[in-house]
Amino acid sequence: MTLQELVHRAASLHLDKTAVCFDECNNQPPVYYTYKTVISAASELSHFLQLHCDFQRIREIGLYCQPGINLPSWILGILQVPAAYAPIDPDSPPSLSTHFMKKCNLKYILVEKKQLNKFRSSHETLLNYDTLTVEHNDLVLVRLHWKNVEVNLMLNDEKEDYERENHMSSKNSNEEKELMDARCKDCLAYVLHTSGTTGIPKIVRVPHVCVLPNVQHFQELFDITPEDVLFMAAPLTFDPSVVEIFVALSSGASLLIVPTSVKILPSKLAPVLFTHHRVTVLQLTSMFLSLEGGKNRVCFLDDEVTVPLGTMRATGDFVTLKGGEIFFLGRKDSQIKRHGKRLNIELVQQTAEELQQVESCAVTWYNQEKLILFIVSKDDVVKDDIFKELQKRLPNHAIPDELVLIDTLPFTSHGKVDVSELNKIYLDYVNLKTENKFEGKEDLWEKLQCLWKSILSLPEDLLKVPDESLFLNNGGDSLKSIRLLSEIEQLVGTPVPGLLEIILKSSILEIYNYILQTVFAVEDPTFTKTYATKRKLSDTDEEEASGKSLHQKSAWPFSNKEIYAFISLSRGSQILSVNTSTSLTELGHHPLAHSPDLISQTDIKNLKSLNPPPVIKKSKGPNCVKKVFEEGNLVTKAEKMEICVRWRSDTGKCVDASPLVVIPAGDDSSITVYIGSHSHRMKAVDLCSGKVKWEQILGDRIESSACVSMCGNFIVVGCYNGLVYVLKSNSGEKYWMFTTEDTVKSSATADPTTGLIYIGSHDQRVYALDIYKKKCVWKIQCEGAVFSSPCLSLNPHHLYCATLRGLLLAVDPATGNTIWKHSCGKPLFSSPRCCRQYICIGCVDGNLLCFTHSGEQVWQYSTSGPIFSSPCILASEQEIFFGSHDCFIYCCNMKGHLQWKFETTSRVYATPFAFHNHNSNSELLLAAASTDGKLWILGSESGQLQSVYELPGEIFSSPVIWESLLIIGCRNNYIYCLDLLISNQK
């Protein structure tokens, strides 16, 4: 029985079942192969190899590739020739790979096409080879010619084989033993090499008969069934990978494969394993499962062609026997485990001493965390030159973390290297590096480029690294990324959580911006330079210190007759209903994302539905309003919906604020859109016609979105000059201005029970304002700038605030006292959103976080980019929608499980809006915007695209929809109102 026969037996029973899944974790759908596909591809490869390979004696074929969807087919194809596969790691030092190929006397190597250039450039000076003219799918067959090299020819020399066997026979004359012969046609399954931790790497040839019991025992031990999903955790060059692959494929189960770079990122790997693919059998490390063979377990080392069964090998471990148990004491050499692999630190020292530039050296394992190489150089040398030479000679896991140049090595009185003194030298070295930190952003950029070029061994004459340069595409790997991370953290003088993932997937410019945002709290991703006038608070503000309240209830100075009946709509499908009786459903606008707590249950008045008139053909409004039917681009002409511009209104500068739509109950009242601009203008525009009702010039830029007071008479908005403006809703007249000590980008929230207005500021405070008495009721210090908008829950009565220091706070709305707080570790630009049970918020570390109202974190969902978008939670509390800078729109259920995700063409900064189309009975829809100016209309249940429309400018504003009209701001200076039309109605 062989490994491939086990797989064929399982495949015959499960031809249409998924055999292999490869997930690149790059926001693209995973790739799946059925057993039928795997077997078919393997058979084609076997036939190809049988035609083009001429074997003599030992049948071995090298496999030079990265993990991928075709890996199992390639391995099976080689085994079916029959031949043993010999995996070669493209990330290994060329000298080590060459040594392996020479020792194996490999004649043929299958090279993955994507790796062919790397194979050629890495081995052209070390190997004599030619490329066969025939290729097979994604593989190229390379034939090796060994000339003028020391190759052990004993495997092909009958005479020496006979002498070896005769010698072994005479040596064991007293006890006759059965022999296993590696030259048998179906004997060997695979060929590996040892790590070389104890010297020169040894070649290990493993027969089918020795690995089969491990596979079968694993199946039995863990009761593997066709319903299981197994994860390939081990690299192909490590024995456990054989067990992982063949346990899965011989059981009818599924094998999950991910790129090597993902395996070192727990935050990225965990959701792949446990959320996306539901892995059931997992082998995390080589120590997770110990498989001990009996007397039949035999491995062939180096030149061995026959080995007596039951041969024992010395491991180099010192142990003691007590009560029949073995206790580990230590090793006879200097082995450590680094990056999951064994390493003898003496190998690093010996390799360094062989360099011409090195006089003497020593290696320490500092705090069992860092490998430090101390060098006494012969002449003035550049550390980068030594690093480059070491990278050519050492495997990646043996490259030192730090290289420290010293004048002389310290010795003890007994003449040994003084390790404790070396540790002191290194500590002084680290402190000196910390003191020599950069000065300013430009210096950081230059030093980051120097580190980039040094670690990736880029040409010194490269003046500037391109902004879009990617680490992995320029010769980086997981181990080099760890070194870059270490260098950056030493440069900035503090740990940078999450940076490793950014290094592996982002450009150097994005890495630079991430460092600025996370370490130096660059507070605004849309504007790096902001200005805010700081003022001292005047006596008339009548503020009290944090936690002290002037009063707990606001006495509204209006009778019920003076309180308007209205509905307001704001970003994220937030709906506030005041003094209304007619349900939103009756109006054709379903209550989608409002919390019942925010529906005011005051006196009842009828509210008339205001259906928008047909699309306007000719402008009747003022000159600043233009009807633009030709502007914009309907990218996809959807079957269900078409989009056209109803009107646009010029503000003079970018519009990053989101619209507030207020629908009054009066028969003669029109629906009004309130929105501000970077031109300092605050506008009130008629929703249906685009006519400007009023315009007010404020003191600085406006990024804050407007909020309507509970009486409906006032509009509240923040400004870059640090002021909170209270404007009369019918005229724009300034009613009151409240002064904070820094920029106000936060949007205000109104409390239906008290009428208080809550708003945050970059002065690190949240304020409770009684706009009727023109007083500050309380303010609270939040330990970080407040960019996002406060979120109010009435049951329990909590106010949730988030800061750019990563703090989420629950505050008592009556007093300003902190109820609880949670540190999320990274800045929170997203605004919190709450429902009956939970509070959700996005974080720039790429996670959507969910908490209970008592502050307990329930779950988190990880995306591949920072989250600036605020969540949109449906009233049913079944789904939550949000966007991410990884260019995806996400839908999760309230358990944190992904329902669907949709890839856009750019980052998603805005908050989605869920709605029912007024003219259709179709499923609930979702509107979202990406920063490249595209508006996406999706089915909320499936995530399927209904329509997409492109505006002529970037979008950081969030859409708001009333009936069939969508309103949004754009960075081309305009506010847009778009008609969402069913195709057959146009």
Image: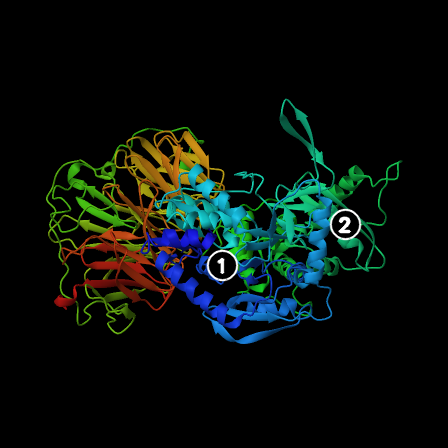
User: Residue 645: horizontal and vertical position, in percent?
Assistant: 24, 67
Left or right of residue 845: residue 375: right
Question: Toward the viewer: 789 or 893?
Answer: 893
Q: Is residue 930 above or below residue 861?
A: below
User: Residue 285: horizontal and vertical position, in percent?
Assistant: 54, 42
- The chosen color scheme is rainbow
**Helix, strand or loop for disc 1:** helix
Three-letter code for the amino acid on which mark 2 is drawn:
Gln
Question: Toward the viewer: 658 or 154?
Answer: 154
The residue pinned by badge 1 equals: 79
Quarter holding the C terminus is bottom left
Three-letter code for the amino acid on which mark 1 is drawn:
Leu
Left or right of residue 282: residue 986: left
User: Residue 305: horizontal and vertical position, in percent?
Assistant: 64, 54
Q: Which mark is residue 349?
A: 2
Of label 1 and label 2, which has the lower sequence position? 1
